[in-house]
Image (tube, rainbow, N blue to C red):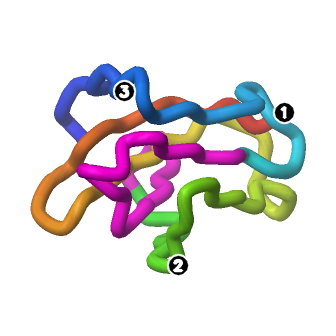
Amino acid sequence: LGESIEELSSSINIYPNPTTNFVNIRNENYQNPISLIEIYDLNGKLVDRIVDISETTQLNFYSYSKGTYIVKLFNQENVIGTAKIIKQ
């Protein structure tokens, strides 16, 4: 996780942030679909990996400890964006 946080495309929306339970990831760029989502804690430990992706995907943060998480979004080949999510 040494890399910097990349700007998310304006076609990708992540909400609500901060969250207490669920986070929605909506991708409106049909030419560049998300194929994988990885969630990391701030120590770089992989917390979850989601491969069942739709236009709007809901991530369940309910069981996570309070804190900041890094969400990485991938297409078939590359990271297409990263975001910090705050779990309250």
Dot 2 lies on which element?
loop
Q: Locate residue 66: give its quadrant.
A: top right
Compute the Cα span from label 2 to label 1: 25 Å
Image location (x, y in percent) of residue 1: 26, 43
Earlier in the chain: of badge 1 and badge 3, it is 3
Magenta stretch encompasses residue 84: no
Q: Amino acid at mark 2?
A: Asp
- N-terminal of the two: label 2 or label 3? 3
Q: Which mark is residue 52?
A: 2
Question: Circle 1 is placed at which residue position?
Answer: 88
Residue lying at 36% horizontally and 27% vertically, measured from the top left: 8
Using a 10 Å C-alpha cutoff, classify the residue at mark 2 as few (fewer than 14 neighbours), some (14 to 19) or many (20 or more).
few
Determine the secondary structure under disc 1. Answer: loop
Q: Amino acid at mark 1?
A: Gln
Q: Is residue 5 left or right of residue 42?
A: left
Span shown in magenta: 24-44
Across and down, in percent, residue 55 comes to 55, 57
Which dot marks residue 8? 3
- Quadrant containing the C terminus in the rendered view: top right
1 or 3: mark nearer the eye: 3
Residue 45 % position (x, y): 42, 60
* Horizontal side of residue 73 vs 4, given as left or right: right
Q: Is residue 12 above or below residue 39?
A: above
* For residue 50, side relative to residue 67 (left or right): left
Q: Crowdedness of circle 3 by 10 Å Cα count: few (<14), some, many (20+)?
A: some
Residue type at numbered disc 3:
Leu
